[in-house]
Amino acid sequence: MNNVLKKLTIGQTTFMIIVVIVTFTLSIFSLFAYRLMYSATDDLIKTSSKEFTSQLILNYESYMSGVIDISNQIQRRLSNLDYPLNNDDIEVVFESLIDVNRNLRGVALFDSNTLLASSSIQLTQDSQPWIELALSNEEIHHFKFVDDRLFVLKSFTLGPFMNQTLTLLIELDKSLFDAIAFNTNLGLHGHILLLNESLMPVYSVGDYDETQSLSVINQQLLGMTLLEYETQSMALNVSTIRGTRWMIATFVNVNAINQTKSEILIAMIGILLLMMVIVAFVSASFSGRLNSPMRRIQSHIQKIQEGNFEEQIEIDGQIEMVKLADTFNTMSSQIKQLMDNVVTEQQEKRVSTIKALQNQINPHFLYNTLDSIVNLSENNQNEDVVEAIIALSKFFRMSISNNQNIVPLRNEIEHVRNYGLIQKIRYKRSFDLMIEVDESLMDIPVLKFSLQPLVENAIMHGLHPDMFTLIKIRAYLQDDAISLSVFNQGYGLSQSKIDEIMTILKDDLPTSSVGLKNVYQRMKLYYGPLAHLKIESVMDEYTNVILTFPLNTPLEDVV
């Protein structure tokens, strides 16, 4: 993570941190809010379902209570009749009650399996099973649905000695019973089941799969639960109805509420995404205000790296960025001043060094030449003395004619030719100086006094006392440089000696060989790494020293 952050800019890091923190905070808040909403919605579903079922049960129980009141009223009216009961009196009682109670459709009274009296009722089935059902438990009223008709049965005892058991069969207006459930909104696949003690449906409202519903009810038994039914979310509530052996199971479709939960979740996700976009936009604007000055400062740094110290940076914005820019401008100005001072000092030092090295050549050469002239004079070689002095005058006249460090190759060749003439007189013409330079190369600028020290070394260390020696000077072009070589026959150098000489030159170690070291130092001071010195040699055969200078050097002292 740290490696990733290190590769980002300050603005990008700020942007990423703000977005991550705000996104994390909003996500946690949204998740917490959704969990609360989800829990509250589930609680609302359970509460609403329980209240709905409770109200439905209350309505059914109220209906049942009214039916039981009618039954008890009939029993009281019958108990007030003279005993033994007269069929006509019974029918009068029945008809009077049917007229005043709209829920009552018909009444029949049985003694065992014998019909004693009836009013407005049609019996299409054998009454024996019904009578047995009522007699099985005389304490409760038994409700029964047959052919879309609703009946209630109740057994009771009557007579002076309470020794006659009668069974009352009442047919009720089923439409009033249906109205209790039909007026409710259960939703798609929502339904109501009334179950007997065997958990078999005796009455239902709504479209349902009986097998699936009964399976779910058998697992739930009593209480409330949320489940999936026919791809719909349902709230199932199972309860008992007081005064009967029935159980009621309500399946209420809560898919709309769950759909609302999904819609709320989608809305919350949408709001979260919108907030993330807004936060990203705001943080991008903020990080841009922070990053833009930093990019301008970075661009300014790159210009300074390229050597442009003149341009100043101006920044508007945060106080810290403005102060940083002002400080940077001050620092760049100071650096420019320091660099100018260093360059001036280095140029002055370089000029002084080159002049000192160059002046070192003149006394050295003058000393050696005068020493040669003295030897000639002592040997009475007057003509050679005259020739040597003339050559020396030409040599020094060329040396002091200008103060340039770079001269045309023509001048350097003429310089070496005069020097060679002086040395040939001194060494009794025991060597020959051959110059092989094409006329087209004569005007190419080269380092002043670069060949004479090499020729001097060739004479001092290369001449063989018993044989004539050839010294050859060549010039040739190589890529974008000119190479000058001084070749001499003679003793030659071993590779270890060559390595030793190169080490002395490169590491500026003390040495008695003034000329070669002087040329190398002046060459490096003026040309830098573009100039090269190379020594080639074979023992007892030859030595070849090669100088390489870059072309297009102006004929003026630029140091």
Image: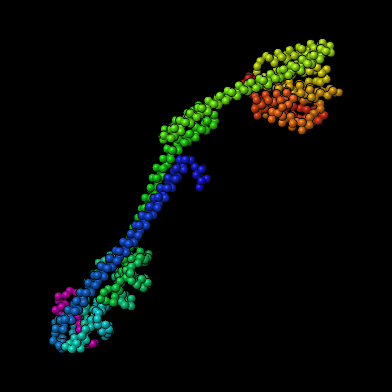
Quadrant housing residue 518: top right
Closer to the camera, 260 or 150?
Answer: 260
Residue 175 visible in rendering: no
Q: Position of residue 334 (x, y in %)?
A: 51, 27
Does 500 appear above or below 49?
above
> Which quadrant of the rendered structure holds the C terminus?
top right
Residue 96 within the magenta-colored segment of the rendering: yes
Residue 430 image-quadrant placement: top right
Question: Which one is in front, 316 or 331?
Answer: 331
Q: Residue at x 50, y 29 (%)?
A: 332
Q: Nearer the viewer, residue 498 or 186?
A: 498
Seen in the picture, residue 43 relative to 159 is either above or below; the reply is above
Visible residue check, residue 294: yes
Q: Is residue 555 left or right of residue 182?
A: right
Residue 51 appears at what percent x and percent y? 27, 65
Is 303 a magenta residue? no
Q: How many marks?
A: 0
The residue at 60%/21% (across/down) is 348
Residue at x 38% of width, y 52% of height: 29
Q: Is residue 217 left or right of residue 146?
A: right
Q: Nearer the viewer, residue 311 or 178?
A: 311
Taking 173 as reference, is 549 above or below it? above
Name which residue lies at 33% across and 71% down. Answer: 222
Looking at this view, name the residue that lies furthest to the right: 466
> Where does the magenta region start and end?
95-114
